[in-house]
Image (cartoon, grey):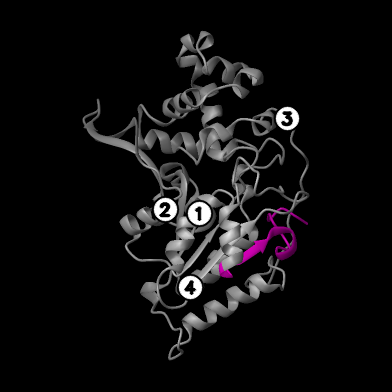
Amino acid sequence: MIRRHLLSLLGAGLLALWTSPAPVQAQSPASDPLPSWSDTAPKRAIVDFVARVTREGGPDFVAVEDRIATFDNDGTLWAEQPVYFQVAFALDEVKRLAPRFPEWKDKEPFRSVVEGDLRALLTAGEKDLLEIMSVTHSGMTTAEFMKAATDWLATARHPTKGRLYTDLVYRPQIELLGYLRANGFKTFIVSGGGVEFMRAFAERVYGIPPEQIVGSSGVTKFQIGQDGKPVLLKEPEVAFIDDGPGKPVGIDRFIGRRPIFAFGNSDGDLQMLQWTAADDGPRFMAIVHHTDAEREWAYGRQSHIGRLDKALNEATARGWTVVDMKRDWKKVFAFEP
């Protein structure tokens, strides 16, 4: 996975990976189809759009087979601070794998990761970060990678929230996914994150099956294993980057239908939103704006992770829906009181 700018993975975000977690509380039950959404313009726009495209005989009716909804993952369906969660996985994988590679104790960037040397990590370059991602995402079968990712997701906890990473999915978006599917939509993830990493949790957490995930991917090679059974081996070579202008390409290549509903949160999603908006008929384009420093994080135009600048300008100019997290979501996470 190469998410937007690898150099942006450094900075204050890495510092949080070694801090103590904060206490959290359990959620309270909700009842209506979108209970975690405030009764503000974004919720009303969503409900109105769904009603229009599902009203048979209406001027905006869309056949079920064309009700395609695409969602970015990082920052749109789950949190992405202080670093992308797949990067946190890669750093933890270096520590887990270190006993197999004793030479890492004297080799950068692995020495810094294993020893928690923040000063060295903060000055690491793109080459070092690529090496960390390569080592932790290749040289194994796809089944072995899936097990490593699944095991990590079952136990690893966010450095400041103290929760499993899969607890940090956005409750309003889970409700929205279910609402769309209940109205005949087919929901897809279209993300710059690694497709195999997302497959380790997306069906269980989002209800989105593996075949409806479009993401960045590496080269895999078919071979016969030592036990005589065929395997797919992950190689240290990038096959496809599903970010920025790669998102419309990925949608066309792997979905084959243009979405009528697209949701993102950053400039990396701009081209997906533009591609969705460009066709005739009813279209819905939306952006999550991270404005809640108390419940989540507040960031946008100047952020190195999830930067929202050009996409926010275009959304404002073209009348796309901008979801203000602080104002428009009653809940952010399910564990909130």
Look at 64% across and 76% down and name the residue there.
Answer: 44
Verify whether residue 266 appears in magenta.
no
Q: Which mark is residue 19?
A: 3
Closer to viewer: mark 2 or mark 3: 2
In this picture, is 230 found above or below 319?
A: above
Query: Looking at the image, how many numbered discs can be counted on the residues?
Result: 4
- Return the x and y of residue 279 as percentages of the image width and height: 40, 71
User: Given the image, on which type of amino acid does mark 4 rest?
Assistant: Arg
Q: Nearer the viewer, residue 250 or 88?
A: 250
Q: Residues within 10 Å of mark 3 (few under 14, many from 20)?
A: few
What is the span of residues highlighted in magenta in the rendered image?
318-337
Q: Which residue is mark 2?
A: 247
Structural distance between the alpha carbons of marks 2 and 4: 17 Å
**Element carrying mark 4:** loop
Q: CA distance from mark 3 to mark 4?
A: 43 Å
Q: Earlier in the sequence, mark 1 or mark 3?
A: 3
Q: Earlier in the sequence, mark 3 or mark 4?
A: 3
Label 1 and label 3: CA atoms lie apart by 31 Å
Are dots 2 and 1 in contact, CB under 8 Å? yes
Instruction: Point out which mark residue 269 bears.
Output: 1
Secondary element at tag 2? helix
User: Which secondary structure lies at badge 1?
Assistant: helix
Q: Amino acid at mark 1?
A: Asp
Amino acid at pointer 3: Thr
For disc 4, the marked residue is 283
Residue type at mark 2 is Lys
Tags 2 and 3 in contact by the CB under 8 Å rule? no
